[in-house]
Image (spheres, rainbow, N blue to C red):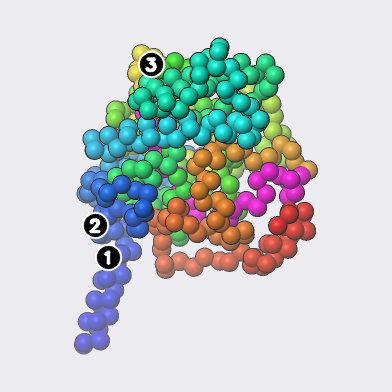
Amino acid sequence: MRRITLLLAAAAVSAEYFDVEEDAFWENDGPQEPRKTVKPKTTAPRIAKRDRAQLSLNQMVTFASQGWIRCVKCIPELRDPGVAAALDRGYEATLRQYARYAPSFMLDRFDVDVHEHNEECGPVVMELLDQGRRGVEEYLDRLRCSVRIGRHYSNVSLPYFQGLNVHRVESVVESVATTKALGLAAASLLQAAKVRLYQTAMFVKDPAHGAGLNNATGWHRDLQLVPLDTRGRGYVTFWCPYERPLGEGDSFLHFAVGSQRDIGFEYWYGNPEKLGPLIAARYAITRVASLDVGDCTAHDGWTFHTAPPQDPSRGARKAVAFSFVTTDAIPLPDLDAENIRVDRPDRVFVREDEIGWRDFYDDLEPFEPVDHELLPMVFEDTRATNLPAPGGKQSLLNAARAAGANI
């Protein structure tokens, strides 16, 4: 009898952790390991299970087939005013970070000196960054002016602005990004046993600032900007409004249905100069009609998507995105396509988001699953068994070298 009692007790402990119906599994208990870069600990509000939607089997099937879904009450923590305030603070911090980074990016990557047109555009000086958000926006206006004038002899442009990794400067955002509930949602959509938080990103389209911060977002796939090879497995982004609901006239993401499964697109068409018309002719383009705060859309890393400018009559559109990757992803070994993809000049890796991954990429081991403190594990089902890569690391290394990789 004592043996049976002990076994039942052990089973109860196991169920409390693994059964998704248990309250303890779903509660918001913050990040697993606080990091030195994060401010003194604050966490998002605790959310009752009844206030958070659970993904259905139908949603998982729709995600797999269409490449995106609407997820109602997916991240209810975003309704909390404290979380919204933290996102606003984080946005301004990442805006300044981008402003400091952009000139060196243009010089290092394109040999473009943004200070060459100070007379026409006004001096691009760091002092503006200490004058609040308007100072930062003035700095960016001058930066864009300089690059625009420079296009007379160059076709380069500034990297697309997004406030990357706000969770690293605002711990309350980190506590939202690393909840077990959100990690489980990501793992469920990717059908994975383990997932890591890859990044958070702020997307604010503000017509009051003009075209600078209200440009259309061009057609793209997220994994084109991520220096990881998911080996056909998984990357998912939850895109969510905050501060106010979104409705008619607001800028939503538009998705090319099924594009994440369309290997023929890349095989037959490569990298066409005019992507939009080909996508519109090839796929059904869909979007949601509205999103409440706490609702999100979730899309696969290979799903083509875009977003129009924000309607000035609607004011600013504020959104935050949480991206997750499966733990068996490995770093791309040849970002400049000098070796492995030497015969595919259209497959040069786009470094536009380098500010988001430069702090961890060089620390990753080639052909090893990603493992870094800046990419925390947010969900792990220890009952599942991951199959090793066929042949193991050495076989992958040998095959890559045989293909011409300088490793």
Disc 3 element: helix
Label 3, label 2: how far apart the Cα atoms are: 44 Å
Q: Earlier in the sequence, mark 1 or mark 3?
A: 1
The residue labelled by disc 3 is 208
Left or right side of 4 for 107: right
Q: Nearer the viewer, mark 3 or mark 2?
A: 3
| Above or below: residue 237 compared with residue 155 | below
The image position of residue 342, as x and y in percent, is: 76, 44
Task: Say which mark, if any, is on residue 366.
Answer: none
Write the start and end of the magenta stretch as one range: 317-342
The answer to whether any part of residue 184 appears in the image is no
Look at 29% across and 67% down and name the residue there: 15
The residue at 74%/45% (across/down) is 338
> Residue at label 2?
23
**Looking at the picture, does residue 282 appear above or below residue 13?**
above
Seen in the image, is 163 located left or right of residue 222? Answer: left
Q: Earlier in the sequence, mark 3 or mark 2?
A: 2
Q: Position of residue 71 (x, y in %)?
A: 37, 40
Residue 320 shown in magenta: yes
Q: Nearer the viewer, residue 350 or 7?
A: 350
